Structures are given as C-alpha cells and as structure tokens.
Image (cartoon, rainbow, N blue to C red):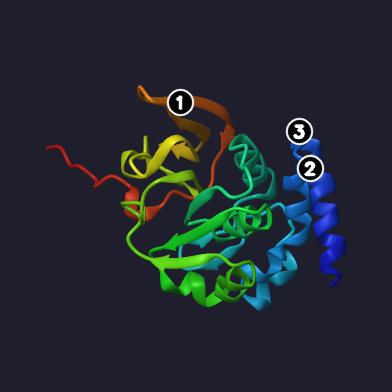
Amino acid sequence: MDFAAARKAMVDSQVRVNDVTDRALQAALLAVSREAFVPADRAFSAYAEVEVEIAGDRRLMLARDVSKLLMSLHAREGERALAVAAPYAAAVLARMGLNVTAQESDPAVFDVAGAALATDGVATVVAPLTAASGEGYDIIVSEAAVPGRPEAWLKALSVGGRLAVVERTGPAGKAVLYVRGEQGISRKELFDAAPPLLAELAPEPTFAL
C-alpha cells in the first residue's frame, strides 16, 4: 500500500474539505505516518474514516475530528503540550515544533506507537489519566472523549493555555476548547464528535431502589 498517497488523500478528502486551513497543521498531517500508530495488521485502515484500534480501548481519532481539534488550539512552535490518550495528535504537534509529552494509562499503547513517538521526539509517560502528568502546559489535547469538564487537566494549564477535548455523555458529543486566563477559564463549543469515552473517567454507575 502506498501510505504517502493515502496520507495525501486523507488530507485532501477528510481534512481540507472540513475547513482545516492551517498550512503548518496540514504539512504535519502529511508528514506523520498514521499507520505507525496502529498494529501492523491494521495499517491498511489507518487512513479510512474509521476509529482504528491502537491497543485495548484506545482508538485513533477520525482525521477530520483530530485535525479540527488541533487547529482550534492555535499551536505555536516551542510551546509545551500534553497529549492525553492521544499518541497520533502528540506526533502531529511535535512535527509542528512543540515540546510534547504523551500520557497513557495503558502501556500497551506505547508498545504499538512508542517507536513512532520516539522518532518525533515525543516524551512518554504511563500514569492514570485522572490527572495530568506535570503542569504549566500551553496545550493539552485528547483524542478520546471525557464525560464532562476535565478539572484535573485544566489545573495543569499555564495562563494562556488551551485544552481541546470532546465532552460526551450520550451517543453524541461536543468538541470543546478551554482557555485559561488570568481571571478564570473560558469554554467554547466547536463541533459535534463522538470518539470513545475514556473508561477510567466514566462516572461510577448509581442504582436506585
């Protein structure tokens, strides 16, 4: 399979047509080998409009959704970024010149994607996703959905920092951009999306008699 041609087709048919106009982001998407973030026997499907399994519960976010999410962050070269359950997004941000850490709770994800992340200079950390690893980040992004406002992640942002994530409580979700200011945190809804929910952030079920 010609993966370079598949990448170009993905950017042309799934990214540009969905109003992703940032040329630096487009160039990074063309440069990152998306097939390297899934097991070899699934590489052929890395550029299709499906959420391909990486390992365990983790999936690649749709190219349309991850590109729109990343564009909303207005990433700048030299910024510090944390990619939570987002190995592919981590590599794209690194190609854009950011200093990126990828955080996962399941080490099996890095068994699949670790080599590709190392190639792009992404640091990796295995830790529970209920809190961000470190603090003072300019950017935090996740390719998975969360059940509500991710307070623990927001605490890790510096002033001026941005967090992009999909919030989902039912079949559909909403991509959201948070920005930390001097006086508080703003929230802006971006577009509809429905990536899988991070299981460890899902609320405990409650029972009533």
Q: Amino acid at mark 1?
A: Arg
Q: Position of residue 116 (x, y in %)?
A: 63, 71
Q: CA distance from mark 3 to mark 2?
A: 11 Å
Query: Please, is residue 79 above or below residue 167 in the view?
Result: below
Q: Is residue 88 left or right of residue 183?
A: right
Q: Position of residue 161 (x, y in %)?
A: 47, 37
Query: Image quadrant for the C terminus?
Result: top left
Q: Is residue 52 left or right of residue 170?
A: right
Query: Image quadrant for the N terminus?
Result: bottom right
Residue drawn 49% across and 61% down? 58
State the mark number for residue 19: 3
Q: Position of residue 33 (x, y in %)?
A: 72, 66
Residue at label 2?
A: 23
Q: CA distance from mark 2 to mark 1?
A: 25 Å
Closer to the camera in the image, 32 or 123? 123
Furthest toward the front, the residue is 78
Tag 2: Cα neighbours inside 10 Å, few (<14), some, or many (≥20)?
Answer: few
Tag 3: Cα neighbours inside 10 Å, few (<14), some, or many (≥20)?
Answer: few
Q: Amino acid at mark 3?
A: Asp
Residue at label 1?
A: 187
Tag 1: Cα neighbours inside 10 Å, few (<14), some, or many (≥20)?
Answer: some
N-terminal label among 3 and 1? 3
Looking at the rendered image, the disc whose residue lies closer to the viewer, 2 or 1, is 2
